[in-house]
Image: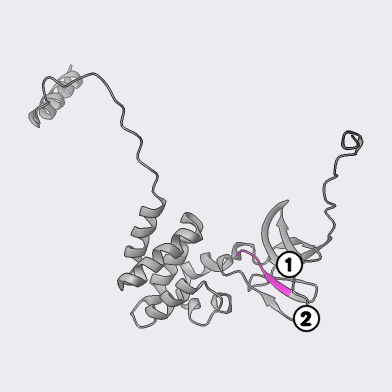
Amino acid sequence: MERAELMPMPAPFDGYVERAARVSSTCLVSMGRNRYSVPCEYAGKWLSCRLYPTRIEVVADDVLIASHARLLDRDQVNYDWQHYIPLIERKPGALRNGAPFADLPTPLRQLKHGLTRHAGGDRIMAQVLAAVPVAGLDAVLVAVELVLEAGTLSAEHILNVVARLTAAEPPPSVETHLQLKEAPVANTARYDRLRGSVEEIRHA
């Protein structure tokens, strides 16, 4: 009986401390004596950082571009390796000792380790990581696991598996009562006749 008289639950209070910060050349912003990564296309720009009790959010033009768990100690760095994918597409060599890529998911770490023995392995790894923003991380991880089991480490093989995993289902066939009585015959001479008709029209 009391439930009908109760006030509705209000929305949670969105309380945070907001500060402006400039992105460094290594795609990091400083907040609370720690640093957090943002997408590399924002290097050198001023962004808005929102400090919550348990997380950090970075906003550009009222659009959320990065979110990290808040670091409680000092002088720490929180990387998101996906923020650096456009960079490694231009400079695949950054994968070798790049700090942002130290915490890759296990299948990607295994692939990276296997590609170190191949010429051009950095370039192949960069192509695989570049598929993450397009196809999604889950699809790429499944494709990498399948390729690792097969033992064929190539970007073409992985991207082929990703394409199969993310392909849309074919449309259902439409049933019809119409039947073909006379099958079409391949006749390439029809094209020459059509071209001749067009030329005659132009001359006219």
- According to the image, label 1 marks what residue? 22
- According to the image, label 2 marks what residue? 74
Q: Is residue 178 left or right of residue 125?
A: left
Could you say which is closer to the camera, residue 163 or residue 198? 163
Could you say which is closer to the camera, residue 189 or residue 132? 132
| Quarter where residue 101 is shown | bottom right
Our reading of the magenta stretch's main secondary structure is strand
Q: Residues within 10 Å of mark 2 (few under 14, many from 20)?
A: few
Instruction: Return the residue found at the far front.
Output: 1
| Residue 12 image position (x, y, % from top left) | 83, 51
Q: Tell me the residue at 73%/61% (across/down).
A: 57
| Quarter where residue 182 is shown | top left
The amino acid type found where label 2 is placed reads Arg
What residue range appears in magenta? 35-39
Label 1 residue SS: strand
| Residue 173 image position (x, y, % from top left) | 31, 32
Name above or below for residue 83 compared with residue 190.
below
Name above or below for residue 149 compared with residue 159.
below
